[in-house]
Amino acid sequence: MRSHNSHESVYSRRRLLRTGAVTSAVLLAGCSGNGDDGSGSTGEDGSGDSGSDGESQTQLRVGLEDEPRHDYDPFIALRSLSTRINHHIYDMLYEYDENYQIQPKVATAEPEVERSGQRYIIEITDQARFQNGDPVTAEDVLYSFVGRIEEEAPTSGEISYLDTESSAVVDDTTVQLDLKQVVAPFRERLMTHIVPKSVREEDPEGFYNNPVGSGPYRYVDHVEGDYIDLERWDDYWDDPQPNIPSIRWMPIPDNSARLSQLLAGDIHATTRLPPADWNTIESNEDCTNDSTNGFAPLYIEFNCRDGPTANPDVRKGIAYAFSTEEFINNVLNGEGQRLVSPLTDTILENWELPVEEYAELKPGYDPERAAELLDGNVPDGWEPQLVSLNRGYYPRFNEMLAGRLQALSEYGVDINPQVQQYGSGRFADVVFSGDAEDVAMFGLGYGNSILDPDDFIWNLFYEEQAGITQGNYYQDEDFHSRIEEARRTVDRERRSELYDSIIREILEQTISHPVAVANAHIGKRTVVQDYPPIGLPMEMLRAYSPRNNASLQG
């Protein structure tokens, strides 16, 4: 069995890395990629259900692209892999339905909003129970929010504006959450895992090692490098009951090994295989592919503060030089959608924002126009620092962009990009430096957790996030005041107007060049039923949710 660090020592370390953890969350490779090198394990331990599809199907075996940290305490869970597992152990106060609309889970109805958006009064069901038999109370709900801030937990940053002094329990099934100031996307932050206050406070280390939630599955074990086991909680309080008796999550970082184990039936499902492997899966009569629109966009980001890319004509020229269609066809194997704005089309449509107008504003592939804009605005033989992560599709993305810029020599513009590829820590240091000697442009994939436009616009463009979650350093007082206003008003129509003006400026000034969003994908055995891909990275691989209840046939 894995020997875990104590809750306190891990917690202390994470507290020191709080800002870095937020940065890492933003730098998620949100679309399908090539993964990191490594080897996987089938996790055979004599427990049964470890063979091919012909055997009894009582355990769903899921291949993960990396080893999850032991972050099964929602107060500290920042990575998408841990959060995917936590979705099975814990219930949320609210959650997304199959159409990505927020619906009550432990709550019974929409929150009652008072004080112009600074107070949320929420009633919860009296039926919910934790896996130790205790009822889920308003005290537990309050603690699941306020406790994170009081402990300065790693996940407290996303709700740091909560007023811990005036938020309170109204009665056993009613909680009042107050904000220090209006923050419109707080409604989506109500999608929070609920933890049992008494259990966690009494023995934090015990809770860290053996978490207790109110979700459909109980935590069993985590053997590092081998598997994470969950078992169905047969007394789950909600309906319907989960179909699958147990789930084994198996870290298999190497893509080839993960694909081989899927084809052999050693695992039932996996995700984040390169699109080039999808045909191989489909050609196996015992396997199938399933994909849907993703929500994790890829952008070309520019250093707007220093060097030639501080000139909007240079940024726009680079955007004209890049072929989004070539990237989608050759790197994503056609499994992706062209972005016309920093937000995906699904979010734009949900907010009634003009998709077609943005498509006309965004520069398309036009090397001749690129050369016109760059000629005279960049030095002859310019060597811009072109930076990306060293994994997934990022290296190919970098090479493609560099190649397109070099090809402008045909039009009399001599550019020799210096391609730099780093691991996530060094990548963050470089791209957030704002120094042209370090970075002129960089590829960024954003793994968002909610679908409010604020999650993209605030983190990727707001001035106070410079050096933390954004590296463009774009300066325009009115631009940033509109981002601030959009966050501080609950009037959806006004927010939509503000985001429209913000998006137009992003496109017109080419602060960022939206490229594409890869489809979310699951490769799976045909015995697996009702296990669809989910566009949000944090929601992927859920065996039980408002949209599905997976089962194994045969």
Image (cartoon, rainbow, N blue to C red):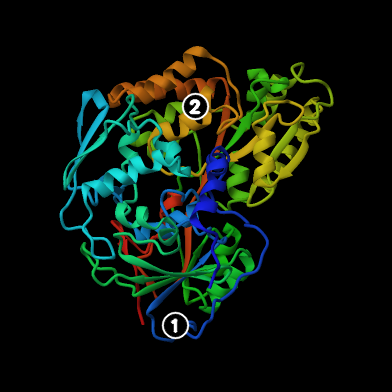
In this picture, residue 396 sits left or right of residue 146:
right
Which residue lies at the image location 69% right of the left edge and 48% below the top edge? 390
Which residue lies at the image location 36% right of the left edge and 43% below the top edge? 147
Q: Nearer the viewer, residue 75 or 479?
A: 75
Farthest-out residue, front: 202
Please identify, in this view, whether the residue under mark 1 or under mark 2 is nearer the observer.
1
Farthest-out residue, right: 381
Name the residue type under label 1.
Answer: Asp
Residue 173: x, y in percent? Answer: 16, 47
Mark 2 crowd level (few <14, some 14–19, many ≥20, 10 Å Cα): few
Q: Is residue 424 above or below residue 509?
A: below
Q: Nearer the viewer, residue 354 or 538?
A: 538
The residue carrying mark 1 is: 49
Name the residue type under label 2.
Answer: Glu
Q: Secondary structure at mark 2?
A: helix
Query: Considering only order in the chain, which callout, 2 or 1, is on the residue closer to the N terminus?
Result: 1
Q: Secondary structure at mark 1?
A: loop
Q: Which mark is residue 360?
A: 2
Mark 1 crowd level (few <14, some 14–19, many ≥20, 10 Å Cα): some
Residue 214: x, y in percent? Answer: 29, 59
Q: Is residue 344 visible?
A: no
Residue 439: x, y in percent? Answer: 71, 31
Which image quarter is the C terminus in? bottom left
Which residue lies at the image location 39% right of the left edge and 36% below the top edge? 159
Q: Is residue 27 visible?
A: yes
Q: Is residue 308 above or below residue 59?
A: above
Q: Which mark is residue 72?
A: none
Q: Is residue 419 above or below residue 379?
A: below
Cα–Cα span, label 1 and label 2: 54 Å
Q: Quadrant of residue 87?
A: bottom left
